[in-house]
Amino acid sequence: MTMHVPPFRDPEVPLRDRIDDLLHRLTLDEKVGLLHQYQAPVERLGLGAFRTGTEALHGLAWLGPATVFPQAIGLASTWDRDLLRRVGEATSDEVLAFHHKDPAGAGLNVWAPVVNPLRDPRWGRNEEGYSEDPWLTSVMATAYALGLRGSAPGMLKTAPTLKHFLAYNNETERCTTSSNLPPRVLHEYELPAFRGPIEAGAAVAVMPSYNLVNGRPAHLSPLIGQALRAWAPDDLLVVSDAYAPGNLTALQGYHDTLPEAYAHAVKAGLDSFTQDDDRSEATLGHLRDALAQGLLSEEDVDSAVRHALSIRFRLGEFDPATPYDDINDNVVNCPEHQALAREAARRSFVLLENDGLLPLRDVRRVAVIGQLGDALMEDWYSGTLPYAVTARAGLAERCETVFCEAVDRVTLTAEAGPVTADPAGGPLRAGAAEPGLFDLFDWGGGAYALRSVTTGRFVSVDPAVDGGALVNDQPGPNGWEVRQTFRTEERPRGTLALRHISTGCYVGAGEDGVLRLVDDADQAAWLAMEVVGSGTDAAARVAAGADVAIVVVGDHPLVNGRETEDRMTLALAPGQDAVVRAVRKANPRTVMVISSGYPLTWTEGELPAVLWSAHGGQEYGHALAEVLFGDADPEGRLTQTWYRSEQELPDLLDYDIIASDATYQYFRGVPLHPFGHGLSYTTFEYADLRVRIADGVLAAWATVTNTGSRPGVEVVQFYTHQQRSRVKQPLRRLRGFEKVRLEPGESRAVELRLPVSELAFWDVTRSRFVVESAPHQLMVGRSATDLRLSARFEVEGETVPPRSGTLRAADHDEYDAITFVDETRVDGDAVRSDVEGAWILFRQVDLTGAATCVAEAGSTEGGMITIRRGDPLYGQALATFPVPRTDRYGYHSVTASLSGAEGVHDLYVVFENEGVTLARIDFGAGA
């Protein structure tokens, strides 16, 4: 007898029909149970449990030892699409292996890649992204996601999720800050990073961000439906960030009740609530209440469930078999993945500076120096290192090495006497006869860690011991709540107080001598810190006796910048910076090797060679040795501008890169190292640039020749600049690149093919992209500022006409002292004045025939708006509007007469009071 197979389990049935069949079989309550991260099983239909969210940013994370590849920004610095795809494939192999072993613990919806453009290097999560350029971010993310999703037709290997939508580059008050996004920044900078991977079908899910955008929580953004789902070729799953749904009523206070908030979220496009970990009862209860109160319909639930089920179907959950069923534990950290990790690390190194010292030649003895010289770091989204090849270990395989950690060795003495560490790892105590010894690690930003010499373990705070005693039992700074770092504060007579960074509490000494946390600064112990062994002196001595000194410096991924914490400075930690200066003075043949997840600055200006990479994963040391000794050309290139100081950056919360001249596209200064920079061990010559436009495509060709004596890798970069425009245009914008490997004397033609439509910018006057008729310059070279050739070309397009009729306030051309806000809770943007005299500018407004105008505005305190011609202070006042008092989302239509308003004018809308919200101004159909 043939068993009846329901249509939803029949792979021959079209996917949409399979989903419809299963949806019709589910009760409303069963469907609601699928809206949580931990989707409930439906046993009567044979549906198992399903969980969204497995971390896979640069390898499988959080589930035990697995292959650890370089951080995402390091992978991007390879500028190698194929490599990122292969790393994605390897990562998905290991996800599948863990899933087959533990389906509940390792889900197939992976939360990667991160596509937030790296607008500001002070962002605590800088290392998670790919680039400050949205197009390059899109290219790298698409490649990695294609590897994650697999190549089997119609079947997902894993389900990649783009993070974090939208305009998310700050950890400071991240759940309550609103990112101000003018329309051009939204459409030209933020959205393109998401569009590429979604349109390519590489990413099949998106996670909104914690922040608000233009006053509205990102989890409620109408752009989820208007943009993301409009781009997706298939159903797109939208999953919340952890605990973000609860913020809608709590931290953000956007809705009064959770049923209201959750109903709004579902209607906006959220399909899966990541709330309360695996405890789904409360969340599902609020959704049921929303249904009962008429805030949510069954059709709304069906839409969300369809997106969730679509992913499960495409992962093969309801098929008899998938092409990936045979993947097992043998792939985890297998030799092929180890080799790939080594290749990725090697290709990610960027040679920032070199006077000829590199590659190393005729070297017998190398000094490896620095607190990162014999350590590899895991970041929050790293996997667990299965093994670690440090710089010291990698170089020791090549030549004789000597090592110096270059940290100060100190003693601490309290009023009760010297401080010592318990040999068993227990509490630190004051009052011993002889002082204990501690090594002091400087991680920058005023953050220090102490390691007991007695135990070799780091000082930490254990809330469970003696009311928050200081113990010495940790391998280093670690965990979500890093309890191993302190700041110092000066006290009288040359003493200091230690302040615990995680809690903000001070270190005090009890009557029993135990060091424990205290709330009051007045209770803090005054500690005398004496340096009994100078790290810089020791480093200089070791460096002086070596042929070459390799100083390995950088950041700790969990200190001075990480998720929940931005950094305030780009400066290398002062202690490490002093080591670099001392080593350079002791040995002119000094190489500074930087391992960091963000750009750094340093004070030593005469370094023979500087080499950077992100934290490079398990094979870092081998890769470093291959580059230093010239086995491989350093082929990495920067994907982010290295500024000379954080003083060159706008405010951390200023997301308007156009107005603030931010990123390589608009920055007018001279950076320490530009976007796209990276030296080679050979030299390259560019010639014969040709440009042609035909059939709507810009085609360009150039010839690149290796003019040096050794093989090398060049990343040929194409940029454009529009030379005349109605609006402020980028100084340069990356349009394409090609990575070429050339033997000495070898030449190769490289080509750019760019649809002319890609030269468009967002026209705020008509809310669409437009290509203007204008001259452009095409530039090709080695970086955004090292441009070897250029050619002018003309584009035939449109001329943006004057505005008329209704002008949305958010679609202005320029502004001063205004904030973008939500026009309504559901949709639309408006502007609100921050101070008296704030203004917005509309250029070229045609007022022909307009006798009156209508402003749609409101204010909780009332106010006044004036329209001035030509200047916000002294321009002729054409109209004045009294703005009545309204509630937060209330607007009044106020009419005013226009005087002397014929013709086309630049109009300034001046807010005479703080707190006035303007949605639009209508100059009438006859205008």
Image: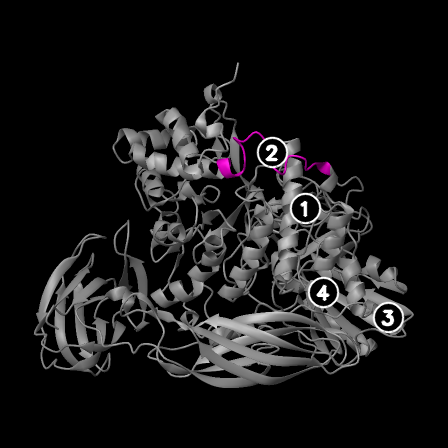
- The reply to whether discs 1 and 4 touch (Cβ–Cβ < 8 Å) is no
Residue 723, quarter of picture: bottom left
Q: Which mark is residue 553?
A: 4
Whether 326 is among the magenta residues is: yes
Q: CA distance from mark 1 to mark 4?
A: 23 Å
What SS does tag 4 mark? strand
What SS does tag 3 mark? helix
- Identify the amino acid type marked 4: Val
- Identify the amino acid type marked 1: Ser
Q: CA distance from mark 1 to mark 2?
A: 30 Å
Task: Kindly identify which residue carries mark 1.
Answer: 460
Q: Which mark is residue 541?
A: 3
Q: Residue furthest top?
A: 1
Q: CA distance from mark 2 to mark 4?
A: 36 Å
Q: Position of residue 84 (x, y in %)?
A: 63, 57
Mark 2 or mark 4, which is nearer to you? Answer: 2
> Which is nearer the N-term, disc 3 or disc 4?
3
Picture residue at 90% right of the left edge, 65% below the top: 399
Q: Which mark is residue 105?
A: 2
- The reply to whether discs 3 and 1 touch (Cβ–Cβ < 8 Å) is no
In the rendered view, does 522 fall on the left or right side of 593? left
- The answer to whether residue 900 is seen in the rendering is yes
> Which is nearer the N-term, disc 3 or disc 1?
1
Mark 1 or mark 2, which is nearer to you? Answer: 2
- Identify the amino acid type marked 3: Arg
Q: CA distance from mark 3 to mark 2?
A: 51 Å
Assess disc 2: are there few (<14), some (14-19) or many (≥20) residues with their C-alpha within 10 Å of its C-alpha.
Answer: some
Vertically, is 515 above or below 687? Answer: above
